[in-house]
Amino acid sequence: MIAETVCSAVAAAGLGIAVVTAYRKRYLTATRIAAYALVPLGLVMTGVVEWLADTAFSPVAWAGFGVLGLSWLMFATTRTVERRRGGTRKGRKAAREAATPAATAPGASAPALGQAPARGQSPAPRQKPAAQGDDDFSDIEAILKKHGI
């Protein structure tokens, strides 16, 4: 009851300010003030203010807001955990498969960080790359294979 009275008084005061503003020949500003002043009156007439007042003092409504907050918190937490783990189930499976070492191709070179030669043996001579362009493409091929492309 008191909320409706306050909203009606605010609307009346706003309309009064709009009339004074229009008297000063600031019609655009007066129209805007009148529009803002009519909002609380419209909310009272539609029953929104009464519904809000009933909701504000209802323990069931506050419990409902608590449940909605808990639901939102659960969604946010699962989303954060999913991002840290690497995405969806398909993404994690693809990451596991990519992490397992695969057999090398028959013509592939030895890995750069292999085992050291035994004492007394000289290290294997390094082979000169065929061309600088081939080395660049092998890096690109390795990256594409890593991502499964």
Image (cartoon, rainbow, N blue to C red):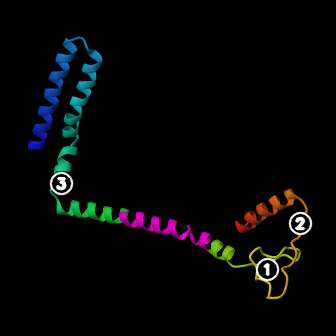
Residue at point 22%, 30% (across, down): 38
Q: What kind of residue is marked 1? A: Ala
Which numbered dot is residue 56? Answer: 3
Residue 15 drawn at (x, y percent): 17, 24
Q: Quadrant of residue 131?
A: bottom right
| Residue position marked by numbered label 1 in the rendering | 103
Q: What kind of residue is marked 2? A: Lys
The C terminus - image quarter = bottom right
Mark 1 crowd level (few <14, some 14–19, many ≥20, 10 Å Cα): few
Left or right: where does residue 8 sit relative to residue 34? left
Quote the CA–CA distance across marks 3 and 1: 67 Å
Residue at point 60%, 72% (across, down): 92
Disc 2 element: loop
Q: Which-is-in-front pick, marks 3 and 1?
A: 1
Q: Are marks 1 and 2 in contact (CB under 8 Å)?
A: no
Residue 27 drawn at (x, y percent): 27, 15
| Residue position marked by numbered label 2 in the rendering | 128
Disc 3 element: helix
Quote the CA–CA distance across marks 1 and 2: 24 Å
Magenta extent: 73-92
